Image: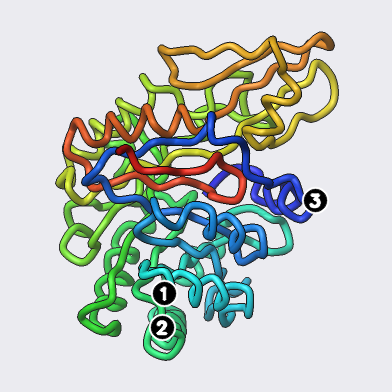
Amino acid sequence: MLAGVAAVALLLTAGCSSSSADSHAASIPAGLAVEGYGTASAATLKALARDTAAIDTVGISGVSLTAEGGGVAASSEEALAILKKAHADGKKAELLMNNIDQAKGDFSAEIATKMLSSEANREFVISGLAGEVEHGGYDGVQLDLEYLSAANSDDLVSFVSELRAALPAKATISMALMASTSPDAYAAAGYDLPSLTADVDRFVLLAYDEHGSGFSEAGPVGGLPWMKEAVAALTSLVPAKKVDLGVAGCGYTWKTSGSGGVVTPAQARSKAGTRASWVAAQGEWTAKLADGTVLWWSDGRSLTTRANYAKSIGLHGVALWQISTGDRITRAS
């Protein structure tokens, strides 16, 4: 879902995911759906308790494809605890399946290809996901397969169609999409969106990682002009009412020497102090520290800005990655 997956995991285990003051809370307009993502962790459970009144669906980042692409691990006790809390609060819960290489801590095109290109592997994976829905109690599955290519396109369509046939009729299938700014670029990224639309209930546009430490120069995490281009390209291919706008609840640092990293909005504010500046054209904050370190981050105000935009153009909703690092989410009165 976000570059630097391992860094985000370390951020959580280090205890840096505390909620921030209400003055930084996001305000979501009525009638717009909200999905809050979280890893299978105590930090997510705590954030869910904080944000539950504003959330409709909890996306639990729970299972990865095996290294050979022939299966998925079972949900952890932590994931099931979040599922239980979501249902107790009257919320839906989706199980996220990803193609993260656990040895490297990042998404793997090779692992995804091993699964998608093999009918037997697809069958094993689908069996595992169907079992999680039928016996674990998840309301649906979200496919977060990243760094695909056009060569994966037909197999991805087959996989989704086969998954739809295996799941109960009431179970949903959603799909996370890496952002592209042209229709052709979505096809090049392995997403045959016109063919996928029949079996996918909702597409989540991951409108972040326009810039990030370790893979680009300093810049907005997912600035408004770039985000709007990606939305326009996507909604030329699928109905707007099937699209959720993915928003980051974190930021990046770029140091003058050495490596940067991932920061929560609260950490960014603490580091930046009075140097923090809201860039309205990008809908994000930035700062340059005394030592030359540059920060860009997406916070509650950023989410509010994007939620209002999503509502104005008729999107289904917004999706925050992730609630344990982001600011509090509220509903507009």
Relative to residue 47, is residue 31 depicted above or below? above
Q: Few, some or many C-alpha atoms within 10 Å of disc 2 (few <14, some 14-19, many ≥20)? A: some
Which is more foreground, mark 1 or mark 2? 1
Mark 3 vs mark 1, CA separation in Å: 28 Å
Disc 3 target residue: 14
Q: Residue 163, percent across and down?
A: 31, 77
Q: Earlier in the sequence, mark 2 or mark 3?
A: 3
Residue at 48% over, 52% down: 51
- Labels 1 & 2 near each other (Cβ < 8 A): yes
Q: Residue 117, percent across and down?
A: 42, 70
Disc 2 target residue: 137
Is there any visible trace of residue 120 in the rendered image? no
Is there any visible trace of residue 38 in the rendered image? yes
Q: Earlier in the sequence, mark 1 or mark 2?
A: 1
Mark 2 vs mark 3, CA separation in Å: 30 Å
Q: Few, some or many C-alpha atoms within 10 Å of disc 3 (few <14, some 14-19, many ≥20)? A: few
Q: Nearest the camera: 33 or 193?
A: 33
